[in-house]
Image (cartoon, grey):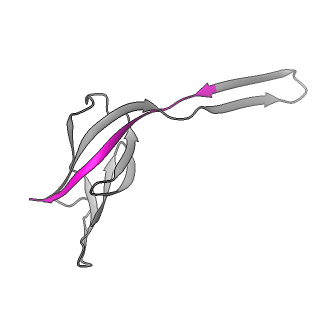
């Protein structure tokens, strides 16, 4: 069984017992439980597919916050030809690792 959830303007495909890496959840600490209530799609083990318009009303995905970390470094560069100008910028995005515990029907 898997589900598609919406969080922080992005969509994630999640399965029970797997990890998902979302945008940093600032109000959660490692060990806290997190609920994803904006579930867009669920595919059950028997092949039945439930699709929300836009979200399913009676489905919740429960997870547990594992850690907050930074992703790999990304280098960005601006270069202006014939101006003797270049700028190099680095960026590391924060993310939250969440272990999906259960896809629950209410």
> What is the residue that sits farthest to the right in this orientation?
82
Q: Please name the residue shown 27% across and 67% down the image.
A: 1
Q: Please name the residue shown 20% across and 50% down the image.
A: 37
The percent position of residue 11, horizontal first and vertical second, equals 38, 53
Q: Is residue 78 left or right of residue 73?
A: right
Could you tell me which quadrant the C terminus lies in? Answer: bottom left
Relative to 89, say whether 61 is above or below. below
Relative to 61, say whether 82 is above or below. above
Label count reads 0
The percent position of residue 86, horizontal first and vertical second, equals 79, 24
Q: Is residue 88 magenta?
A: no
Name the foreground residue: 100 vs 26: 100
Q: Please name the residue shown 24% across and 59% down the image.
A: 55
> Residue 54, can we see it?
no
Q: Is residue 65 left or right of residue 9?
A: left
> What is the residue that sits farthest to the bottom in this orientation?
47
Chief SS of the magenta region: strand
Q: Please name the residue shown 27% across and 57% down the image.
A: 16
> What is the residue that sits farthest to the top in this orientation?
84
> Residue 8, can we see it?
yes
The percent position of residue 81, horizontal first and vertical second, equals 87, 30
Q: What stretch of residues is rendered in magenta?
A: 90-106
Q: Quadrant of residue 43?
A: bottom left
Q: Is residue 87 left or right of residue 68?
A: right
Q: Is residue 98 magenta?
A: yes
Relative to 91, say whether 48 is above or below. below
> What is the residue that sits farthest to the left in this orientation?
106
Q: Quadrant of residue 39?
A: bottom left
The percent position of residue 22, horizontal first and vertical second, equals 38, 42
């Amino acid at each position: 069984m898997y589900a598609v959830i919406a969080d922080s303007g992005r969509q994630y495909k999640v399965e029970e017992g797997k990890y998902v890496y979302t945008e940093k959840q600032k109000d959660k600490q490692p060990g806290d439980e997190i609920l994803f209530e904006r579930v867009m799609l669920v595919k059950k083990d028997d092949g039945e597919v439930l699709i929300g318009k836009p979200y399913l009303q009676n489905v919740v995905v429960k997870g547990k916050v594992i850690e907050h970390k930074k992703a790999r470094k990304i280098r960005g560069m601006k270069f202006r030809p014939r101006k003797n100008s270049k700028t190099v910028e680095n960026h590391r995005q924060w993310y939250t690792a969440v272990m999906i515990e259960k896809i629950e029907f209410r």
